[in-house]
Image (cartoon, rainbow, N blue to C red):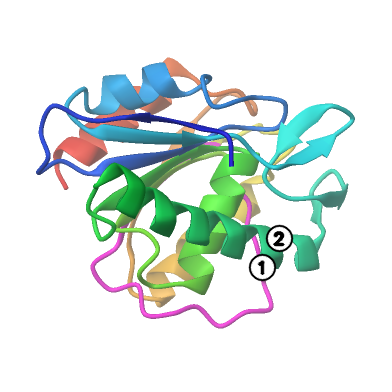
């Protein structure tokens, strides 16, 4: 997978797995990762799926309707890639925190839904519930920050509250943060994510 790896200045800090939104690339969220923790390592990945020339992490059938088979395959592919990248770049695989926006947040959420060891934590900007038909693993000790918009036209509010509840029911420590904006990633929610991260 096309990616950027930036080693951090403090090896005790996590490695951020950075996952862009539809039509983005591996450069988009680097400033956000640097703002949340300038000492952390960063593994920023470009989605392997193209939708009308726009990179994504998995296929969808229409807006808000996921191709579940492709989501499964691409989630496994991403998890395998992170495992290999940890060996190649020498970071601690057990200390990876995802930072995802929109489509990137959705595949990060699905990593949580499918593998208890995939992520130590996740910062999810405007995610949806990736899969309502699966039993979640035990996520005790996993911290998750969800940023949602009260008038997000792409991600209805109940997607955020349902995701919060599903993750909590699996044992995760979840913080749901609301902004009165739409689907865009805003600086106030990044600041809220940083404040949450600083207290982990």
Q: Nearer the viewer, residue 2 or 127?
A: 2
Q: Is residue 145 magenta?
A: yes
Report the side of 10 relative to 103 (left or right). left
Kindly indicate the quadrant of the structure image that contains residue 73.
bottom right
Q: Which mark is residue 131?
A: 1
* Magenta stretch bounds: 128-148
The verdict on residue 43 being magenta is: no
* CB atoms of marks 1 and 2 within 8 Å: yes
Q: Residue pushed farthest front?
A: 88
Picture disc at residue 43 = none
Q: Going 41% across and 21% down the picture, which residue do you hit?
A: 30
Q: Total label count?
A: 2
The residue at the point 39 percent across, 69 percent down is 168
For the residues labelled 1 and 2, the Cα–Cα distance comes to 9 Å
Between circles 1 and 2, the one closer to the viewer is: 2
Element carrying mark 2: helix
Of 38 and 172, nearer the camera is 38
Q: Position of residue 197 (x, y in %)?
A: 23, 39
Crowd band around label 2 with a 10 angstrom C-alpha radius: few (<14), some (14–19), many (20+): many
Residue 113, visible in the rendered structure: yes
Which disc number belongs to residue 71? 2
Quick check: 16 above or below 164?
above
Q: Which x, y percent locates residue 55?
A: 73, 32
What secondary structure is found at the residue carrying circle 1? loop
Q: Residue at x 55, y 54 (%)?
A: 78
The reply to whether residue 163 is visible in this rendering is no
**Residue 142 coordinates in the image, percent (x, y):** 29, 63
């Amino acid at each position: 997978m096309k990616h950027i790896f930036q080693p951090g200045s403090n090896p005790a800090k996590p490695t951020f797995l950075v996952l862009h939104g539809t039509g983005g690339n591996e450069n988009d969220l680097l400033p956000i990762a640097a703002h949340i923790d300038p000492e952390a390592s960063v593994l920023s990945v470009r989605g392997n799926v193209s939708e009308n020339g726009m990179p994504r992490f998995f296929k969808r059938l229409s807006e808000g309707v996921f191709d579940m088979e492709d989501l499964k395959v691409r989630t496994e592919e991403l998890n395998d890639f992170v495992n290999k990248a940890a060996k190649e770049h020498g970071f601690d695989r057990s200390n990876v925190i995802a930072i995802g926006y929109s489509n990137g947040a959705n595949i990060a959420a699905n990593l949580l839904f499918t593998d208890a060891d995939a992520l130590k934590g996740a910062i999810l900007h405007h995610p949806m519930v990736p899969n309502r038909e699966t039993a979640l693993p035990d996520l005790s000790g996993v911290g998750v920050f969800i940023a949602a918009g009260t008038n997000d036209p792409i991600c209805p509010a109940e997607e955020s509250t349902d995701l919060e509840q599903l993750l909590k029911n699996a044992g995760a420590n979840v913080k749901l943060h609301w902004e009165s904006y739409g689907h865009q990633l805003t600086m106030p929610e990044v600041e809220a994510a940083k404040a949450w991260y600083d207290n982990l």
